[in-house]
Amino acid sequence: MARTFAILPVVHISNGPLLRVTLRITVSILAIALPPILISSGQMLAPSALREIPIVPQQPDAPISTYPPPAQQRAGLNIVVLDPAHGGTDPGARGAQGIRESDLVLDLTLQVRRALEAQGFQVLQTRSGNENPSFDDRSTLANAQRGAVFITLHISSTGLPGTARVYTMPDSTALMATGGILSWEHAQAPYVSLSRKFADAVQGQLAQRFKGSPNNSQTATIRQLRTTAAPAIAVEICSVSVQDRADLDRMMPSVGDAIARGVAAFRPSYVLPGETSLRP
Ligand SMILES: [Zn+2]
């Protein structure tokens, strides 16, 4: 007799409806040889059948990035996805003179991009104008790449002006699901320790340039990082509360330089979960 078993549902909650992607395996069972009591719905049946499934979480309704073509990428860390946070109807933090975080982070992104490209990294941006892609769309851009890190850029509303902080997601107990399938909602979990290492490399560079900044990165629950399947950090500079935005503008080239050097310093540590070595 043939039985169909539903196993390992991969659940993705996006802006749209709840989607359930369920892998179904049809198994022919001789009732005598393999009594039904040994196998029941929801149990993992065939681990070997699951090895083909990539651990990159799939977002079925997201646009798929086709650039750059995977075949042309070298092994290791090559791509930096920069995420100017907020945008569109979400201005982020607002400060004196009506300055808006969503605008400032675009200028900051430009400076970071220049510094990274000078170091030979390829840079992709989640937005380059005043639009507001969803959290999932921003993560998708990074998740579709091979050899990428992800940096979301913010200007804080408070904090000591002229300082900068780097954050990563806290350790997650919700690690990879069995069978190599990774839930979209916990995409960051396998990368947390790499993200921490990456964050400390960048924070160390920022601390050298901006007095009063911490020496080590911190953890915080950041929605944008949670669904990103790559080493991922949030960089936040202080703050929109400065009286003159020129104070922030002056920081930006140095922030860019610090981030680019931090990425370069982190590069040798970039060995992704499940891979032995990606160094060229
Ligand atoms: Zn922000």
Image (cartoon, rainbow, N blue to C red):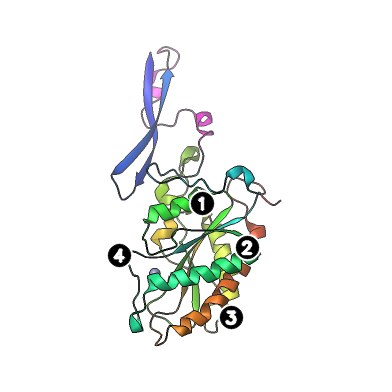
Residue 50 sits inside the magenta stretch: yes
Q: CA distance from mark 2 to mark 1?
A: 17 Å
**Residue identifier under label 1:** 190
Q: Position of residue 91 (x, y in %)?
A: 33, 70
Do labels 3 and 4 touch, CB within 8 Å? no
Cβ of mark 4 under 8 A from ligand 1: no
Mark earlier in primary sequence (3, 4): 4
- 163 versus 106 height, above or below: below
Name the residue furthest bottom. 243
Identify which amino acid the numbered label 2 is placed on: Phe
Classify the position of ligand 1 by quadrant: top left, top right, bottom left or bottom right: bottom left
Q: Nearer the viewer, mark 2 or mark 1?
A: 2
Looking at the image, which is closer to me, 85 or 26? 85
Mark earlier in primary sequence (1, 4): 4
Q: CA distance from mark 1 to mark 4?
A: 33 Å
Answer with left or right where residue 20 lies relative to residue 171.
left
Q: Nearer the viewer, mark 3 or mark 4?
A: 4
Residue 23 sits inside the magenta stretch: no
**Residue identifier under label 4:** 89
Identify which amino acid the numbered label 1 is placed on: Pro
**Residue identifier under label 2:** 266
Identify which amino acid the numbered label 3 is placed on: Arg
Mark earlier in primary sequence (2, 1): 1
Looking at the image, which is closer to me, 3 or 97? 97
- 212 versus 131 height, above or below: below
Do labels 1 and 4 touch, CB within 8 Å? no
Answer with left or right where residue 181 lies relative to residue 274.
left
Do labels 3 and 1 touch, CB within 8 Å? no
Residue 174's disc number: none
Q: How crowded is the residue under tag 3: few (<14 C-alpha within 10 Å), some, or many (20+)?
A: some
Looking at the image, which is closer to me, 163 or 200? 163
Identify which amino acid the numbered label 4 is placed on: Thr
